[in-house]
Image (cartoon, coloured by chain):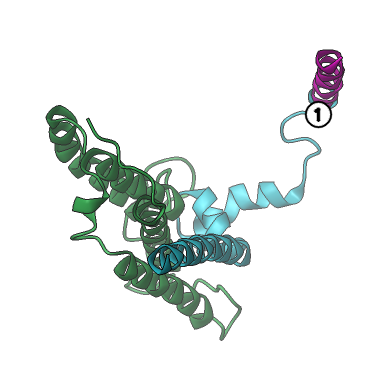
Amino acid sequence: MLSRIVRTVSNQLIVFVLIFGLYLIMHGHDSPGGGFQGGAVVASGVAMLLVAFGSGEIIQWLHVRRLTVVACIGALVFIAIAFAGTGTTFFYNFLLGTPIFGGVPPPGPGHGHVWSGGIIPLMEIAIGFIVMAGLSAVVLAMARFSGGKEIEE
Amino acid sequence: MRQVVGLVLLLILVSLLLWGVLVMRDFGYPPSDMDDYMIEHAQQETGSNNVVAGVLLDYRGLDTLGEVTVLFTAVTGVLLLFRTLKRREENC
């Protein structure tokens, strides 16, 4: 556990880190970002909390087992969406044109809108779940089970 | 002696990297029909304004499936390793 200043600052900062990571995941299909990047940002926020508060406090509300369950659900959703378009081809964008995420942005440069992209935003969200839960579980397991000493001040 | 060998290896490595940079082709050359097609049609066909996301998750979806599999395997391996370490500690 680090000093009170570090704990307070990271306590305030985690809100913005999480919002930025979820924004990257949600808007991966119409602005720079995506599931991998947003998940990495969220996992870095978890790593920041881990450094600031120590693993003994984080482990009380963030369990490695639950994180692995979330990662497995994300992977299953990803492969299920991929198989759902098998009527045409594997990974077919079957949601394009339907009311769910069916919008098509105007061609050329310009801003898109969130409600577009077909299966792409759903897959970004699934990848985001895999990456943020998986990397958080890795960081947490390394801090918890490695047997090293915690940083004390 | 050791430093001389290290210097020679360093010079060989630097010259190889410089050679790779010098003979590198220009950006976007040779031109291909595929990237022009993707720049023209990706927004209409995938519906996503981010063409990179459209290529990664629609045209090259199978590749992204491989990426996700690699990441998932890495997470599984790390968790298995640390679980074994924890069990061994408890036994001792």
Magenta segment's dominant SS is: helix
Residue sticking out furthest to the bottom: A87
Position of residue B53 measured from the top left corner of the image (x, y, whole percent) = 50, 53
| Image vertical order of residue B3 relative to residue A103, above or below | above
User: Residue B59 occupies which quadrant of the picture?
Assistant: bottom right
Q: Secondary structure at mark 1?
A: loop
Q: Would you say residue B2 sits in the magenta stretch?
A: yes
In this view of the protein, which residue sits in the foreground, A55 or B64? Answer: A55
Front one among A75 and A147: A147
Compared to A145, does A90 lie above or below?
below
Query: Magenta span has B48?
Result: no
Residue at image mark 1: B24
Q: Residues within 10 Å of mark 1 (few under 14, many from 20)?
A: few
| Residue sitting at x 36%, y 55% | A136
Chain letter corresponding to the colour cyan: B
Relative image position of residue B17 (x, y in whole percent):
80, 25
Q: Which residues are magenta?
A: B1-20
Q: Total marks drawn? A: 1
Judged left or right of residue B35, residue B83 is left
Q: In which quadrant will I find the C terminus of chain B? A: bottom left
Which one is in front, B63 or A92? B63
> What color was chain A assigned in the picture?
green
